Amino acid sequence: MSFSRRVFLAAPLLAATGSAQAQKKLEMPLTWYGVRVEDNAFTVEMPGIPDHRVVNDVSARGTAFQLHSYSLETGGYSYVAQTALYPADVDITQPRLILQASLNGRVQQLVGRQWTKTDWRQVAGAAAVESVGAVAGGNGLRQLTLLKERRFVSLAFLGNAAGATGVEAERFFKSLKLA
């Protein structure tokens, strides 16, 4: 077969390949998975299998404890679920102080160093605070932090500003089931 004939036969295939790549990428629906955290403290749904990391920490009085962090980035959003069982030397008689410390810890990441919304309430009998704030780049951070006895629980969602109150964030937060 001559060179010109091979080029002529291959040309329609190359053209078809080029037009196929120009089409919009097929978007697969996200599959949500139930994630059971350390010590079966709670379950939450995430749109994929998260990474699990253990962070060694110490209380203000020096007692070691572990923070379990489950994180996932997908679809332009970040999902994080964290839990820790505070040691006996942590004063849990005023849960709002512990939750406020958590808010204060994250406020440094926010535009203007302030939350745009803070809602104190009870969730399944636990003291809780849900907060929303703007992050650089037009993103929004939404978090729910609660303390049930010695169990600290935190959910955080990061994405575009509208996403912080969107369908994915709502599903993530509403899926929380405490043990």
Image: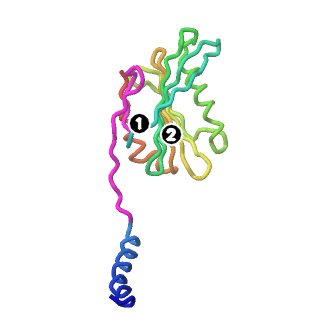
- Amino acid carrying label 1: it is Phe
Residues under numbered marks 1 and 2 in contact, where contact means CB atoms less than 8 Å apart: yes
160 inside magenta stretch? no
Which residue position is annotated with label 1? 173
Say which quarter of the image contains residue 13. bottom left
- Left or right of 172 in this view: 96: right
Position of 164 relative to 104 (above/below): below
Label 1: how many Cα within 10 Å (few below 14, some 14–19, many 20+): many
- Closer to the camera in the image, 59 or 93: 59
Instruction: Estimate the x, y position of residue 115 in percent, counting from the top left.
Output: 59, 38
Say which quarter of the image contains residue 32. top left
Which residue ends up furthest to the front in the rendered image?
1
- Left or right of 33 in this view: 76: right
- Closer to the camera in the image, 33 or 121: 33
Q: CA distance from mark 1 to mark 2?
A: 10 Å
Q: Which mark is residue 142?
A: 2
Seen at 63% across and 38% down, the residue is 114
Q: How is the image coloured?
A: rainbow
Image: magenta residue range: 25-46
Mark 2 falls on what kind of element?
Answer: strand
Position of 32 relative to 76 (above/below): above
Label 2: how many Cα within 10 Å (few below 14, some 14–19, many 20+): many
Of label 1 and label 2, which has the lower sequence position?
A: 2
Seen at 43% across and 37% down, the residue is 50
